[in-house]
Image: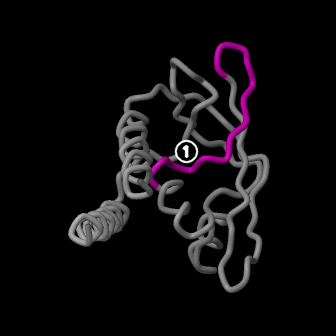
Amino acid sequence: MLWLTLLVLLIRAVWLAVKSRQWPQTNGKITHSGTEAVGNRYRVLLQYEYTVNGSRYNSHILSYLDTFLLFFLSGTRSARAANHLAAKYPVDTEVFVHYDPKNPKRSVLETELWNGNVAIIAIILAIMGGIFLLGLGLR
């Protein structure tokens, strides 16, 4: 059951990541950027705001694949990766925000499907599939 739940979450993340590449853009602004130590890992504290049709929205989502992958790491990264992202998006930076036209609360800053993310997802799927098949074989 856990495997099926994770598979559904992964499919949703990939679908939203692909869909976000077609979403319209609006101007936004980084309102908070920093890092927080969590043991020997780091969490990026990123917030941005944007306006769609006169309504103001806030979000922290960088990309949907990134969010799915961070789920497995409790939202943490290496110090180098966290510092890189915080430096890439300093406070008051103007950014392009991609938003879902059907639900403008849903937005991302990055829409690329990075090769690294795709490789990690393939590994996760292979592991999940192997565990699922082992579970079937034990019955």
Of all residues, the one furthest to the bottom in this rendering is: 40
Image coordinates for residue 132, horizontal then vertical, percent: 29, 64
Residue nearer the viewer, 113 or 13: 13
In the image, the segment drawn in magenta is 52-65
Q: Residue furthest top?
A: 53
The relative height of residue 84 versus residue 121 in the rendered view (above or below) is: below
Q: Looking at the picture, how far across and down is residue 13, in whole percent?
A: 43, 45
Q: Quadrant of residue 50?
A: top right
Q: Is residue 77 left or right of residue 118?
A: right
Q: Is residue 59 magenta?
A: yes
Residue drawn at the location 34% of the way across and 62% of the way down: 121
Residue at 58% x, 28% y is 26
Q: Give the image's coloring scheme.
A: one colour
Quarter of the C terminus within the rendering: bottom left
102 and 134: which one is in front?
134
Using the rendered view, name the quadrant where residue 115 is placed: bottom left
Q: Is residue 12 left or right of residue 47?
A: left
Is 56 above or below relative to 19?
Answer: above
Q: Secondary structure at mark 1?
A: loop
Amino acid type, residue under disc 1 in the picture: Leu
Q: Which residue is mark 1?
A: 109
Q: Is residue 48 magenta?
A: no
Residue at image position (75%, 25%) is 56
Count of labels shown?
1
Front residue of this view, candidates 102 and 87:
102
Question: Which residue is drawn at the image coordinates 65% and 13% (left, top)?
Answer: 53
Q: Position of residue 133 (x, y in %)?
A: 23, 66
Image vertical order of residue 90 relative to residue 76, above or below: above
Q: Residues within 10 Å of mark 1 (few under 14, many from 20)?
A: many
Viewed as shown, does residue 78 lie left or right of 92? left
